[in-house]
Amino acid sequence: MSDDDFARLGAERIQRLAVIARELVSELRTDEVLDHLLATARELTGARYAALGVLDEQRTALARFVTSGVDDDTRRLIGDPPRGRGVLGLLIEDPEPLRLHDVASHPRSFGVPTGHPPVSTFLGVPLVVRGKAWGNLYLTNKAGGADFTDRDEETAVILARWAAIAIENARLYETLDAEHEELARSVASLRAMTEISTALGAETELAPILDLIVKRARALVAARGVLVLLRDPGGEDDQLWVAAAAGAIVPAAQRLAISGTRVGEVFRDGVPLRVDDVAADLALDVAALGAPDAATALLVPMAYRRRVVGVLVALDRRGGTAAFRARDEELLRAFAASAATAVVTAQSVEVDRLRVAVGAADAERARWARELHDETLQTLGGLHVLLAGAAHGGDGDQVRAAVRIAAERVADEIAALRALIAELRPAALDELGLGPALTSLVRRVAGGEGLTAIADVELDTNGTRLSPDLETAVYRVAQEALTNVAKHARADRVELHVTKDDDAVALSVVDDGGGFDVAAAAVAETAAPGFGLAGMRERVMLAGGGLTIDSASDGTTVSAWFPVGGGGGAGAGGQPAAPSATSSSRPRSSA
């Protein structure tokens, strides 16, 4: 500012402008800058009314018009804001300061709208940002009916320059703020995707995956509540069931119809839907979804390989903010794709588990049928022939001999049946606990096969039993490993070791047999599942533990661990340990 500028403006106004300059550049929002600019311009020039017109992208008309000094009622009477024609258009065509004694007398004046306060004197100056016209500052009706002076024009020009700097700073801040918000949302999206991807490898149970999906989706779009709707596997074809929900919602129905509903439409067509006014959409039953007072909704399909498996529903944004935006839809749709993959994977695991369990049960039933047919039934048939022959033609000695033989065979069969019953559910496991049951099991297997056996069981439970499911899992894995040793290992010695700490039960069965090819045995079990290696892996996985099988020409070691206090289908690090193998000999299975 030159000395002449100082002289024209006066020391008091200069001081006031200096204060206002600091205030303007401290504002971080464009709207706040504009409001401050208009109030200050009116104060320093004595104008009754002030306005600022923001140019459109082509800089040929006004895209926005902000006023000061006009109350809300008057603004409503005026109607639509000006577009930059007439006198206002002069500054658009020629961005230079303009002063008028009487607006109405100017040739370009179109007059003022009905309801607009009378306008007389006029001062307009351009706002230039980075060398380009950004808008214009308009001042009218100087106090006392006087004309705007050179000093007023200088003041307005200086204000416009400083305002241009403040506006540019505010726009940069808003841009950075928007980019920061976008980055935060992208990070949240990436975190959500990562958690779902991690769940694919670390979690195979459907329920925990669904819980993770609704919680992460709710955080992702800042929703009041989120639901996952899936095709009802055990219900009607025209229904979806509420598989999971999170947030301040309580679904009123567990199943929703597909036909005639918005959720059904999204499920059928695979196209996202944003509803900005739920009350106006009668096909969206938010009461059934658990939020009868919901105002907005976002529905996205969960698609896996071009097949929609469910619908993700978000209701209302938290904090009373506006409706869901296109960005929310984009984020939730990308998230839903990963979620669908996790759901389908978990469902596939459940189906595979059921298939293995059914196959194992069938194999087990076939095994008991062979045992009963080949041993018990044949023995009973022989006893029938023996006793029938003695009854029809034998003398007293023959009858007594036949009865004696029959009694011996019946005693043998009773012992055999007890052994079968013990394999199905050993009484010692229920009555005495895991330790005595395992010791008895080792003794029985070793005695039947002539093996040297060691049972080393250390279960410090402080007088409390392990859970029935955990005891059964440990017993069955030990039983299967010992049965494999007896039937296939050609071993002379077998050792069973069981220990427990605060976190887990560890089991190992070690033999000195000839070993086998673990990988080949696993392939054989996949093709024709029995209750051998696959059975052990299944039990350990369902208990949430890990299993390893190491085999070489000098013996085999089966090692398993079981977490104390629960399963969940995942072991240390989130997944069971994979079996390993060394040299190859012959496959071993009890099936």
Image: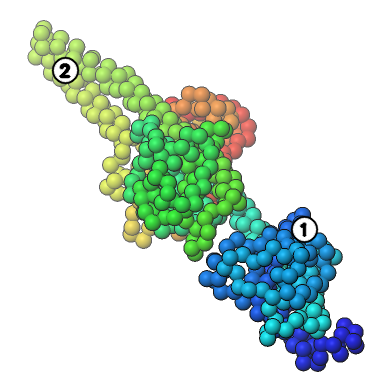
Q: Position of residue 215 (x, y in %)?
A: 49, 54
Residue ranking furthest to the top: 393
In the rendered view, tell whether residue 333 sits above or below residue 56: above
In the rendered view, tell whether residue 386 sits above or below residue 213: above
Q: Position of residue 468 (x, y in %)?
A: 34, 48
Q: Which of the two labelled residues, at mark 1 and mark 2, occupies the earlier sequence position?
A: 1
Residue at point 68% right, 59% down?
Answer: 83
Residue occupied by mark 1: 59
Pick the quarter of the image with the N terminus: bottom right
Secondary structure of the residue carrying numbered label 1: loop
Residue ranking furthest to the bottom: 11
Q: Is residue 567 left or right of residue 82?
A: left
Give the amino acid at mark 2.
Ala
Alpha carbons under labels 1 and 2: distance apart: 121 Å
The answer to whether residue 38 is visible is no
Pick the quarter of the image with the C terminus: top left
Residue at point 67% right, 65% down?
Answer: 111
Q: Position of residue 95 (x, y in %)?
A: 82, 66
Q: How is the image coloured?
A: rainbow
In the rendered view, tell whether residue 488 sits above or below residue 392: below
Frontmost residue, 53 versus 527: 53
Residue occupied by mark 2: 401
Give the amino acid at mark 1.
Arg
Quarter holding residue 413: top left
Residue at point 63% right, 73% down?
Answer: 118
